Amino acid sequence: MGLEVDVSVLAGRNLIIKDKAFFGGGTSDPYCIIQCREQLVGKTEVKKKCLNPVWTKGTYKHHVSGKSIDQRNPGQIFFRVFDKDKWGSDDPMGEVALPIKSLLNGRPLDKWLPLKPYKGCKKAKGEIHVKVSVAVRKSVSLKRGMCTPIRGGILHVCMGWDMLKGGVPIDLDTSCVGVDARGNILIDESVYFADLSNSNGSIMHTGDEREGDEDLGEGDDEIIKVDLDRVPRIVKALFFIATVATPGRTFKDVKSSRIRLVNGQTGVEMSRFHPALKGSQTALFVFRVARDKVGWAINVIGDVDHTARDFGTLIPEIKGYMRDLVPGLKIDLNERLAIMRKGGTIRLRDYCRPGTAPDKLTFGLAWDVTDGVNIDLDASVIMLDGKLNCLDIVSFSQLRSKDGAIQHMGDEREGDEKGDDEKIQLTLSKVHPSCQYLGFVINSYSGQELDDVKDTSCHLFDSATYKDIAKYELTNVKELDKHTALVMGILYRNSFSREWCLRIVSEAAQGTMAKDLVDEMQAFLKRNPPQPLGAARQQHVLAAIPAMVQAQTAVATPGMAMAVPAMAVPAMVTAMPYNPAAQNVTAYATPAQVTAAQGNALYAQAIGGTSM
């Protein structure tokens, strides 16, 4: 229980001059400190001699426990701008103060705000561009009578939406994330847009719909089907999450979106959710299905996030919702996994702990035999300099790069190895300074088309901890039809910070050896040179992460409509119990209709009487 705060300070303009020139005019060296209730959350970098700074390191996630704040005076979020002084103390340039209560209406704040005077600065000047979102993290219930028990059977989680006005496509995704009894994420027991089946086929995804014009019946575009009686015993809980994959879009843009929970045996709709009523958010935790003593139990969550585009960046939150099932569960707020799509780019350090990219990485490729036919796929690395000249190629025919930084672990020709079938190890510190790009390419040496190869995937992981940094699925990628080669991704040095970044290319081609793809990689980089990355979503904790899962009632919140049939569903789900607390919530209120009183009520619900 508590609050989750996402804060960003992006830029400033027309700031006050603090370093005056001898003949008039002058400049400043501004940076911004972000504080919540007078405690440090983070700060931006210093911009030298600039009155209109653009900051790239000013985004943080902050958790506030319910018990640690006073409901009547929850405090404020402060953005305080200073001028960096080389010889003395830094000079204040002004501040922006935002009351937390004013941010509880479910709508992210994104605007330019004027700087006000602050101690030591009586004449503040200019504005700063800030983004702030406050999400209430409520409890999930496991008390008998406060959740929906299920003996077993089949569940369908169905999401449907329509194209935007003018026939503009928009991509929404549904995911089912498996978690074990220790709170660990089970990737092999999770399904999402790129991995459509879990380990034994008991959880199935119908496939990624990227536009909203598919109709699988009842207006559904994507369906996750779960056979609860066959779900592997290692799975303790399943989390169902909806996200907006299209950059720059939120659920607010897709007013037609709806999520239905359906009895897969009878076809009876058990409940319905309307993500658009959540406002400018990009992710919705729909509900949890967890094992109990007699079967399973469904618990509504209904919480949101305004930055995440897939479940890989929500791992700490998912684990937070497991604390009633796993007492004492420790949560690393920086744990995340890049669920990569074509065109996606990440900074490696943003997906690593403790915020720095490991020196030793491994690229792994795995595939299975298809219809008893042995398939020979080859993973290779093409090394290019800044002018796109080919420096070296590491493959089955040359297992080590000339600079000693890259080592191929050998050729697997049949795809019947357990785990990764081929591995390539990289030592980033040894990569020659002239090398700008490391291209990961895949060839079907035996000539099979890549989309015909069963269960093919590749991932980049920390060689020391074996923790995945990024994962990309090749199976079910339509663009690979009739092709035998793929430029999968490029690991490159950022031209400004020299930090290593990973970009998914997923350009299909023809060729049985890595040398056939040099021109494909060069052509791609000429058409699509790397662009500067924005600020990373960082996380900072002032108190312990809130115990988001407590034994309290899970109620419908604004934006979540519960439509449960009055009669019990035979042999599947009993009708959800009447919950008087839910009568105080406007189930279909839009964000614009959420009043200050309702915001305060949500706030009180989040912090009132909660023990850590």
Image (cartoon, grey):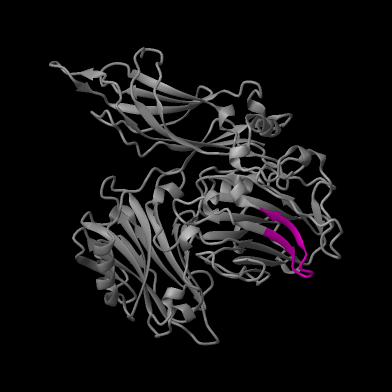
**Residue lying at the far left of the rendered structure:** 23
Residue at (78% x, 70% y) in the render: 265
608 or 210: nearer the viewer: 210
Is 120 above or below relative to 340? above
Is 576 above or below relative to 541? below
Can residue 411 be seen here? The reply is: no
User: In the figure, residue 289 lies in which quadrant?
Assistant: bottom right
348 or 193: nearer the viewer: 193
Q: Position of residue 106 (x, y in %)?
A: 58, 39
Q: Is residue 227 left or right of residue 209?
A: right
Q: Is residue 242 left or right of residue 502?
A: right
408 or 604: nearer the viewer: 604
Asked if the magenta segment contains residue 268, the reply would be: yes
Residue at (37% x, 77% y) in the render: 485
Asked if the magenta segment contains residue 135, the reply would be: no
Q: Which residues are magenta?
A: 260-273
Task: Name the image quarter holding the C terminus.
Answer: top right
User: In the figure, residue 47 lies in which quadrant?
Assistant: top left
